[in-house]
Image (cartoon, rainbow, N blue to C red):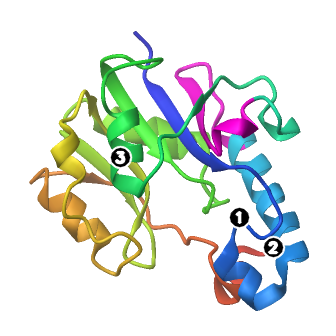
Amino acid sequence: MKPTLYIMAKAPVMGKAKTRLAADIGVVHAKRIYRQMMSQIIRNVQDPRWETVLAVTPPSALGQVPEWDGTPQIPQVSGSLSPRLAQVFSGQGISGRGLTAVIGTDCPQVTASDIAAAFQALKSSPAVFGPASDGGFWLMGARAPLRPETFDDIRWSHAETLSDMRAKFGSVAVLRTLTDVDDLAALKQSKLT
């Protein structure tokens, strides 16, 4: 069975995506940047060695975003990142059991080589993380299924998010550190402007 990569994607709706970035550059420019990043990430990570699935929000956007055409899509469950990650690591649905990785649409630097490295690491580690420079992570990988409690008591959008997740697994593999494009400073670093 092929590994599965899930991309957590939000519909590019004005004022709903990249809200922190929009506070710095305005909603119109933030929407344009988000569309560019999302498209680039989807393009960069597609590879025949794994299945790529978009976990999208809101569910009404399924099949409605041109950048998502040609990629299987499932709706995200509602709530914080905890139930959304629990959903994709549940072992149900498209991926079933096996090597599973999840990324978002915040790190345009991610490549298929990064995803391949994550799946390779899962052959000898219970989990793999791609650290983000803000203390979070841009990738999480594990062997599905994981218990939903794995995602309890995590401080999301916090400098200790990655530490909280790593503590759930003990020994983990770590990929290169990337930068989430969440504000103007990170946008300037990404060279997407």
Q: Which residue is mark 3?
A: 83
Instruction: Look at the numbered disc 2 and give the secondary structure of its residue.
Output: helix
Q: Residues within 10 Å of mark 2 (few under 14, many from 20)?
A: many
Quarter of the image for the C terminus: give it: bottom right
Q: Residue at x 48, y 47 (%)?
A: 78
Mark 1 → mark 3, Cα distance in angstroms: 19 Å
Q: Which dot, 2 or 3, sits closer to the camera? A: 3
Instruction: Look at the numbered disc 1 and give the secondary structure of its residue.
Output: loop
81 over 71 or under it: above or below: below
15 over 74 or under it: above or below: below
The three-letter code of the residue at mark 1 reads: Ala
- Residue stretch rendered in magenta on the structure: 44-62
Q: From where the camera sits, is residue 193 visible?
A: no
Closer to the chain start, of discs 1 and 3, is: 1
Residue 79 position in % (x across, y down): 43, 54
Q: Which residue is mark 1?
A: 17
Q: Is residue 107 left or right of residue 165?
A: right
Instruction: Look at the numbered disc 3 and give the secondary structure of its residue.
Output: helix
Q: Which residue is mark 2?
A: 30
